[in-house]
Amino acid sequence: ANDTLRFIINRIIEILGISISLIGVLLFLALISYSPSDPNFIFPENTEIQNILGFQGSYISDLFFQSIGAISYLISITLLITGVNIFNSKDVFLIIENIFFSIFYCVVGSLFFDFFYQNTFELYINGNGGFVGQYLGQTFLRGQVDGGLGHNPLGALSVIALLSVILIQALTGLFADDDIFFQGPFAKYVSNNTVALLTSIHRFNQYFIFALVGLHIAAISYYHLIKRENLIRPMITGDKSLATKPPLEVEIDSFRQRMLALAVFLLISLGLYFLIA
């Protein structure tokens, strides 16, 4: 009975792997045959379709390109490789691992393309970084230089780097196992080689966190002691007083917005508690 059940489960996993790879291939075909003149969410009235997959391919490719830009190609390749690996290893939880890493490289990749290679003929609405890269670029990489609001470009990059290494630390911790006191809640669902790899990354990544935290402390000290600008209070309160009126309209968070953010934070914390406990 156990052999029969295992046989059925393995065949289902293989079908899942083939399906994921097929989705990756179809997405790749839709992306490479994308045309800005095809019907899409913004200009739906055009009826002549050049996309290989027709109407569906036109809309799907436009959704990916306008969302995360040129990094969409990597999504299709990731789906293809993930499906092949699931088929060979019979490890369904590769999906969870690859989702985590896909989110990471989509954010970094869309931001990279928006900052370094933004303009393109085909993706003329949101550029090569999509609206995700455009939003992150406007929020983090095109801030103030002296005395204004937001981060300057170097400070923004350091913030993104710190958030990235913390994200890596949190995600790898879900699969890490130190063989003594701690085992991540998902470690039992993946192979020993995967656990060993992610545990090594988890341990090594702490040094990047220490370095970036030290860099932030040094930057705050420099601004406070040399430039006579207090950055500690704005970091805590979220508000900054300016000597002159900013060129753009400034949005001030209300008490209701901050309480909503606190509620969301508490819900996420509660969910993580039940996930890990």
Image (cartoon, rainbow, N blue to C red):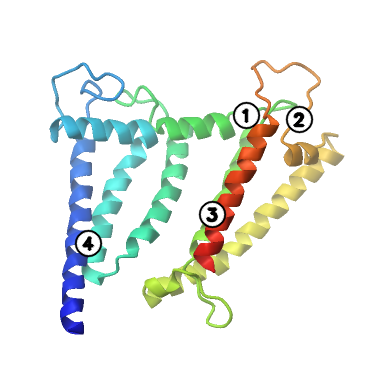
**As shown in the figure, which amino acid type bears the numbered disc 4?**
Val
Residue under the point 58% across and 49% down: 163
Instruction: Tell me the distance, in whole angstroms, between the alpha carbons under discs 1 and 4.
Output: 43 Å
Amino acid found under the numbered disc labelled 1: Gly
Q: Is residue 127 left or right of residue 270?
A: left
Q: Earlier in the sequence, mark 3 or mark 4?
A: 4
**Amino acid marked by disc 3:** Leu
Q: Is residue 151 visible?
A: no
Q: Which residue is mark 2?
A: 240
Residue toward you, 47 or 122: 47
Q: Residue at x 75, y 26 (%)?
A: 147
**Relative side of 201 to 16, left or right:** right
Residue 143, numbered circle: 1
**Secondary structure under badge 1?**
loop
- Labels in figure, total: 4
In primary-sequence order, the first of circles 1 and 2 is 1
Q: Residue at x 61, y 51 (%)?
A: 266
Q: Are marks 2 and 4 in contact (CB under 8 Å)?
A: no
- The residue that label 3 is drawn on is 167
